[in-house]
Image: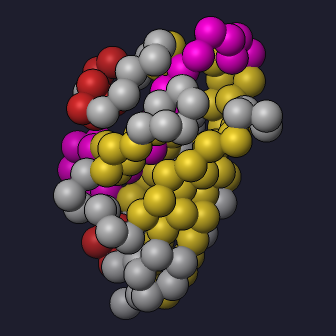
């Protein structure tokens, strides 16, 4: 199993930037992809971005494309989500999740394929 712990969420203002971190521990081998998801009040959890096991492939949803960058540092078992030009509609609980394997591209966008989830970190964007 992999344990995922997010950090970095906080209250920010419209237009601000924020970087979230996700540290993986436990059985971090074999390779695994990481996805960042978010869930706003009253809405379903949705994928924001995902990154492959070696960082060579990334996927972004249309709602965040151009404003968000996902990255990872495998030497620290940490994934990051850099968010820029934040809007009030970005307010949500952001969670990272992992799935074993060397998936890349579209298969990384399948929410139900992720087996290991963190507890989430709250991001609130004030207008």
Magenta part of the protein: which range?
26-46
Q: Residue at coordinates 34% horizontally, 78% vertically from top-left?
A: 88
Nearest to the observer: residue 113 or residue 50: 50
| Residue that extends furthest to the right in the rendered view of this protein | 76
**Percent coordinates x, y for residue 28 in the rendering:** 69, 17
Q: Quadrant of the C terminus?
A: bottom left
Q: Residue at coordinates 35% horizontally, 79% vertically from top-left?
A: 87
Quarter location, residue 104: top left
**Percent coordinates x, y for residue 7 in the rendering:** 66, 52
Q: Is residue 48 above or below residue 24?
A: below
Q: How many marks?
A: 0
Q: Residue at coordinates 31% horizontally, 50% vertically from top-left?
A: 60
Nearest to the observer: residue 124 or residue 63: 63
Was residue 23 drawn as part of the magenta stretch in this picture?
Answer: no
* Residue 97 showing in the rendered view: no
Q: Quadrant of the N terminus?
A: top right
Residue 36 horizontal side relative to residue 73, left or right: left
Nearest to the observer: residue 74 or residue 94: 74
| Residue that extends furthest to the front in the rendered view of this protein | 56
Q: Is residue 119 above or below residue 38?
A: above
Was residue 41 drawn as part of the magenta stretch in this picture?
Answer: yes
Q: Residue at coordinates 56% horizontally, 49% vertically from top-left?
A: 71
């Amino acid at each position: 199993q992999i344990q995922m712990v997010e950090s970095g969420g906080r209250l920010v203002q419209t237009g601000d930037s924020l970087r979230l971190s996700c540290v993986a521990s436990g059985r971090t081998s074999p390779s695994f992809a990481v996805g960042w998801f978010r869930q706003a009040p009253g809405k379903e959890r949705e994928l924001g971005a995902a990154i492959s096991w070696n960082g060579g492939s990334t996927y972004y949803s249309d709602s965040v494309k151009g404003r968000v960058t996902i990255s990872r540092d495998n030497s620290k078992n940490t994934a990051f989500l850099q968010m820029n030009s934040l809007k009030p509609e970005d307010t949500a609980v952001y969670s990272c999740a992992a799935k074993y394997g060397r998936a890349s591209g579209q298969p990384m966008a399948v929410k139900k394929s992720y087996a290991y989830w963190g507890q989430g970190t709250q991001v609130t964007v004030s207008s």
